[in-house]
Amino acid sequence: MNMEVSDNLLIKMKILKESGFELKPEFIIMDFGCGAGQVVHELRNLGYKAFGCDIKIDTQSIHDENIIRLINFSPYKLPFEDNIFDLILSDQVFEHVQNYPEVISEINRVLKPDGCCLHIFPSRYRLIESHVYVPLSSIIKSYPWLLFWAKVGIRNEFQADLSAKETATRNHDYLRGHTNYLSKKQITKQFKGHFNDIVYCENLFLKHLKRGRYIYALSKIFPFIPSLYSTFKTRILLTKHSAERK
């Protein structure tokens, strides 16, 4: 394997392999919510036919080559043909999705009947929200709560020069308008509409995560640990196609 593969992508490939879905050279892969296209580049360097899509395009060169494409919103549609992808990946994207039914329906449409998806979600109950860094703000989005932490001095990397009120206002608007943290039960319900094989595999994630191996070892003694990790840190969801399209 190419030694330049990032740990992030390598972990995903190992999870897929242990789940019985090893990548084949001829696979066509999509990174949903790909940002600047780092994963797309890595996969293409490994020889896979990889594409990405997002609501904004950060890298003009690969946009021009039609490798990374804009998502249409009216109506919502992924910019790909039906039944084209063997594998669809997403990493910390779904916490921004406001229209779960439409998005999952479109993922279902572009995935091959024997295809697979691997999605990584930050948990709703994560102690520190990963965008604004305010404790528990994935649950508590009220302005007074955000203002309290802004006065304490909590800022993200874009807010160093803002006042406490400006920071709280921006965080309040961002969290309410651009985040949507669902519970595990809610996530499962959304995906069950189109996928009949839904597996949470935080145990495999911990097994292959360098800093998670000790936690994985402890989980052999305390089997509830992956569930705790899923609840308070990160959820790893593997889905396979339903027998019937909807």
Image: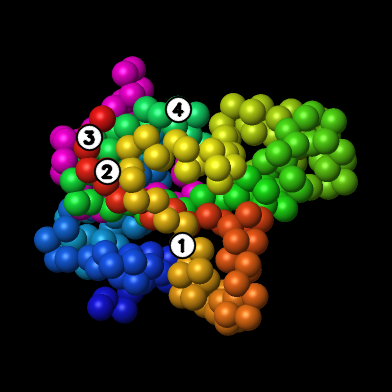
Residue position marked by numbered label 1 in the rendering: 201
Labels 1 & 2 near each other (Cβ < 8 A): no
Q: Is residue 135 visible?
A: yes
Residue 23 % position (x, y):
22, 65
Give the mark nearer the N terminus: 1 vs 3. Answer: 1
Kind of residue at disc 1: Cys
- The tag earlier along the polypeptide, 2 or 4, is 4
**The label number, if any, that marks residue 245 in the structure image:** 3
Asked whether the residues under the numbered discs 1 and 4 touch, taking CB atoms below 8 Å apart as contact, a structural biologist would say: no
Magenta part of the protein: which range? 71-94
Q: Residue 165, labelled with which disc?
A: none
Left or right position of 102 against 123? left
Q: Where is residue 143 drawn, in percent x and y?
A: 79, 29
The residue drawn where x is 47% and y is 57% is 200
Which of the two discs, 4 and 3, sits closer to the camera? 3
Identify the residue position indicated by label 4 in the image: 99
